[in-house]
Image: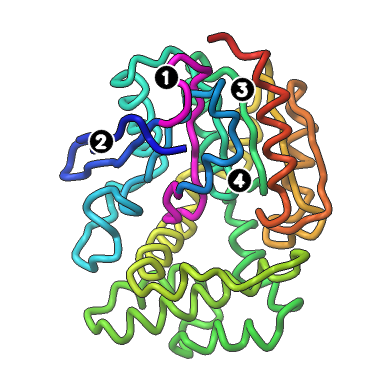
């Protein structure tokens, strides 16, 4: 389970991206594309792979986890932290590690990024396992930050109530991003707490849900909130329907889409539409929420694709 190799990859502009490898060095290469943005690739991702047969590469995306600098530091400029930059980081790492092609495992935001990467570099991908599927469109962001107030009215009022009155009818993500950039550390921390409390709320319908303990860490929650609001306020730098239209470039790739029936953060219609456009995909629906409860389905999907991938 422990990494046999790790390092910091200099990707330019002062950013260094942490990576590690575990499993079988001669096994089927696989890249973990974590969620958030800003969650980091924790050791828990390793448990879903058959490490006797997989060569697993974990990466902390720019600005989070063990990558440097960390977005929890308020002076860190996020202007160069974009979807295309993360794609370029993955490509540089793939070439650096001498990997010809790899399978992508992505969750939540990581499914958006995995789709964008695969569409940019289909020749470098053997297949995809995507769970808690998102495409980070403006309508999806609006659903999470405003429309779900009809499901959690008290929590949503508390979420919006942290904002200046003049910002409450506008773009809530952009408004939170501005609060998280304020010079007063108390204002930044209050905004990060409120953002992460709402994040915890809209995943809380999953069977067996518990609050995410990572949000108790002030550096983690500030890093996470800054990166999420940064990416969401730009709709991942992709136009409406762009990732759906881009399926044409990866239609030939095998893919398993895994989604929880109780996932209201990213409603089931998102992977459904993707699956309908993607002839090489299979949609597996579980009695689960957003991420939680999908562990067995993820493990099974990785196992079922294993023999189909060239070494």
Pointers 3 and 2 in contact (C-beta within 8 Å): no
Closer to the N terminus: mark 1 or mark 2? 2
Q: Residue 25 magenta-drawn? A: yes
Closer to the N terminus: mark 1 or mark 4? 1
Residue 245 is labelled as none
Considering only vertical position in the picture, is 27 above or below 298?
above
Instruction: Tell me the residue at 22%/53% (across/down).
Output: 69
Task: Determine which residue is flagged by label 1.
Answer: 25
Closer to the N terminus: mark 3 or mark 1? 1
Task: Determine which residue is flagged by label 3.
Answer: 127
Pointers 3 and 1 in contact (C-beta within 8 Å): no
Give the residue at the far top of this rendering. Answer: 310
Label 2 element class: strand
Q: Is residue 260 left or right of residue 101?
A: right
Task: Determine which residue is flagged by label 4.
Answer: 135
Categorize mark 2 by other alpha carbons within 10 Å: few (<14), some (14-19), many (20+): some
Q: Is residue 134 left or right of residue 68?
A: right
Residue 7 is labelled as 2
Q: Give the range drawn in magenta.
A: 22-42
Residue 136 is situated, as x and y percent measured from the top left of the image, at: 57, 50
Q: How far apart are marks 1 and 4 (CA)?
A: 32 Å
């Amino acid at each position: 389970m422990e990494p046999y190799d790790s390092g910091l990859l200099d990707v330019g502009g002062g950013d260094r991206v942490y990576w590690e490898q575990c499993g079988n060095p001669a096994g089927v290469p696989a890249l973990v594309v974590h969620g958030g943005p800003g969650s980091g690739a924790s050791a828990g991702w390793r448990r879903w792979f058959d490490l006797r047969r997989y060569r697993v590469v974990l990466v902390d995306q720019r600005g989070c986890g063990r990558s440097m600098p960390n977005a929890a530091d308020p002076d860190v400029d996020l202007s160069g932290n974009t979807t295309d930059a993360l794609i370029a980081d993955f490509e540089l790492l793939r070439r650096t590690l001498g990997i010809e092609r790899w399978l992508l495992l992505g969750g939540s935001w990581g499914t958006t990024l995995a789709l964008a990467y695969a569409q940019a570099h289909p020749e470098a991908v053997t297949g995809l396992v995507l769970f808690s599927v998102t495409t980070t469109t403006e309508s999806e962001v609006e659903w999470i930050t405003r429309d779900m107030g009809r499901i959690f009215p008290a929590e949503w009022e508390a979420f919006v109530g942290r904002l200046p009155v003049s910002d409450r009818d506008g773009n809530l993500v952009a408004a939170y991003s501005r609060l998280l950039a304020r010079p007063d550390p108390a204002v930044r921390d209050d905004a990060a707490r409120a953002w992460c409390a709402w994040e915890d709320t809209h995943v809380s319908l999953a069977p067996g849900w518990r609050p995410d303990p990572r949000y108790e860490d002030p550096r983690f929650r500030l890093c996470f909130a800054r990166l999420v609001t940064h990416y969401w306020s730009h709709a991942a730098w992709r136009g409406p329907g762009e990732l759906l239209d881009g399926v044409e470039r990866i239609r030939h790739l095998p893919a398993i889409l895994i989604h929880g029936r109780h996932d209201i953060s990213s409603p089931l219609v998102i992977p459904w539409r993707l699956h309908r456009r993607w002839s090489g995909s299979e949609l597996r629906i579980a009695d689960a929420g957003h991420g939680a409860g999908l562990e067995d389905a993820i493990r099974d999907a990785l196992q079922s694709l294993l023999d189909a991938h060239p070494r």
